[in-house]
Image (spheres, coloured by chain):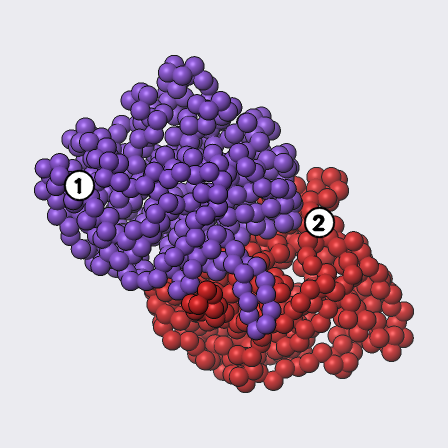
Chain colours: A purple, B red
Amino acid sequence: MRILVLGGDGYLGWPTAMYLSARGHDLAVVDNFAKRRWEVELNVEPLIPIRTLHDRVKAWEEVTGRTIELYVGDLRNYGMAESTLKSFGPEAIIHYGEQPSAPYSMIDHNRAVFTQTNNIAGTLNVLWAMRECARDCHLVKLGTMGEYGTPNIDIEEGFIEIEYKGRKDVLPFPKQAGSFYHLTKVHDSHNILFACRAWKLRSTDLNQGVVYGIETDETQLDERLATSFHYDEVFGTALNRFCVQAVVGVPLTVYGQGGQTRGFLNIRDTLRCVELATLNPPKAGEYRVFNQFTETFNVLQLAEMVKREGEKLGLAVEIQHLKNPRVEAEQHYYNPRHQKLIDLGLTPHLLSDVLLDCMLFRIREYAHRVKKDIILPRVRWDGAREAEESRKLA
Amino acid sequence: MRILVLGGDGYLGWPTAMYLSARGHDLAVVDNFAKRRWEVELNVEPLIPIRTLHDRVKAWEEVTGRTIELYVGDLRNYGMAESTLKSFGPEAIIHYGEQPSAPYSMIDHNRAVFTQTNNIAGTLNVLWAMRECARDCHLVKLGTMGEYGTPNIDIEEGFIEIEYKGRKDVLPFPKQAGSFYHLTKVHDSHNILFACRAWKLRSTDLNQGVVYGIETDETQLDERLATSFHYDEVFGTALNRFCVQAVVGVPLTVYGQGGQTRGFLNIRDTLRCVELATLNPPKAGEYRVFNQFTETFNVLQLAEMVKREGEKLGLAVEIQHLKNPRVEAEQHYYNPRHQKLIDLGLTPHLLSDVLLDCMLFRIREYAHRVKKDIILPRVRWDGAREAEESRKLA
């Protein structure tokens, strides 16, 4: 299958492209390298040094004999989106090409507006370009479980049958996102649903949980194929950050009580889920949603798991509760359904002790590169961040 | 009360500013006159010639002795939004400052992306500026009944109590908007809900039906105070357009079967609803939604009503069914609640024969200005618009 990966330079985009290329598909990646600039802005960097995408594509060919085409450009430029689709002729587009960080979107007005206009305009351009020159193509779009928030009822996969005052309908699941970033995914969902209805496009929206992990079968082939693993407050996520903290001997930073429950999945399962969605496209005009995670944990459970595993390896691990920089419920009901990908054949890699071991060992190799001062949260949802920080980042 | 009206040059913004100024409030209006450029792009114009906003503000002072302050600028510029709030110090902001046309948003990728990024960025900047320098200010935001689409259950005002598998929650009403414009209002709703929660701002979202009417008490004071009344396919709405068609002797253009049912209200009721919301603000942190319309009709009923009234006045009125340029259900259940504004004191002007009479007489004065070639729909939701049209507008 001809598959185009948008955001091919990222934590998930690059491993996805290699994974599908290794399985015989014809791959192309698109990126504008915006995230590399955001890293410089914030003085953060991935744990493992990352080659340029040009060099990784070359290394991939050297190692495997397979080629991945590279398109450099910005999806906010409609001409770029359309000419890429025309030139490559994809049967599926896997869309990771968005600003992916909630804290980044909450830094200030400038980054909030940037995050929303960037993510929305890019996706709209992809939809219009599909309408123009790739009507049968399948858009596999990365959403987030964060779109749903934490309602007091079970969370279904995208749609819910509501019975109300004696009448019934199946309607989009109500959304209550918790940051300007998460809101972009809500906006995308509504836009894509409409485009599928109006133009008979087809799309799968993958409402993904929090991804953890540092290695895939493909990144392990060669050090030059490593993916961009973040542990900082802005681009890092809870479990990845905890593992780095355990290795370098700083306390694991749990936000608030740590009762926030979320869906999690291994990076290897991300690749498999995306593959399953791609190989089983919906029919023309259909917009479907899969909840893409394998297990739920609360943040404190994760911290305790990392502490336990770290201590087995002789690390001294402490857990510290910080004032929660986010606005979110710390105790809440959480029961999201995640059946559709299982039905398509997903066999989860559950978060066993073995997996954490591997991550901790791998992080240890690069422990000397960890910048300890970029881990603590400085971006606060309520706007109470220190004036000095604001000024520096403005 | 100090009240800032965003989009003060528009069909509703200008009459709202006069109405509230006449009632003793301190008013300021903001506009960037973008709509005047879109009119030129599409070669459409309001039925009654409209003075510049500068001149209308002067005329208002001459006629009533009251002043309305004028700020010229673009809300996409954060500095403009913040400095306006700092300078004027509003207690309430009435926000009409968005691209308001569904057909405009469906012309091409460029206008779809513009509509979404323009509306979202402007509103985000207003929210951030309120957070920065007007935390107690009340944002009265114009939304649309079109956010809900036409679900097969009763539509509540913004939120719905869902009982599901033995559990309950009150959640945002599911949204199914029918154009990229309507989707911007859905996106705004989600963004504002979040800002109220995260920053303890207060907002009322007025999900408004289709407004009709050409006169208010204030526009009637002086010809120079007239408001921008559109009858063209892009900025006109069903009932206003039908009245113009009846007067100039072209068939009333009903899209499809005409079974599309919508909420409608008189322009005078818009002003009263906005006033009621403004004078009765929610508490800090609260985001509330009022459904703002007074009656529901289907499109064919409206056309028949105009035909009947027109014939009483001796006009020869024909009804023509056109292939529907939109993607929408032409037969559907529709039972939206609209109680909260009634509870606050709204006494509706219902669509009686008298009101239609007045509109038809007023339109007759300007019938010589009607451009008949801008009434028929050229923008098609499914993208089937003729290539030539596309090229001309690109």
Taking the spot 41% from the left edge, 26% from the top edge, the residue there is A18
Report in which chain the residue with disc 2 lies: B
Identify the amino acid type marked 2: Arg
Q: B248 left or right of A368?
A: right
Residue at which label 1 appears: A309
**Nearer the observer, B124 or B22:** B124
Give above or below for B359 relative to A245. Answer: below
Identify the amino acid type marked 1: Glu
Q: CA distance from mark 1 to mark 2?
A: 60 Å
> Closer to the observer: label 1 or label 2?
1
Give above or below for B20 relative to B96. Answer: below
Q: A289 left or right of A237?
A: right
Residue at which label 2 appears: B380
Residue A270, labelled with which disc? none
Taking the spot 75% from the left edge, 55% from the top edge, the residue there is B324
Q: Quadrant of residue B138?
A: bottom left
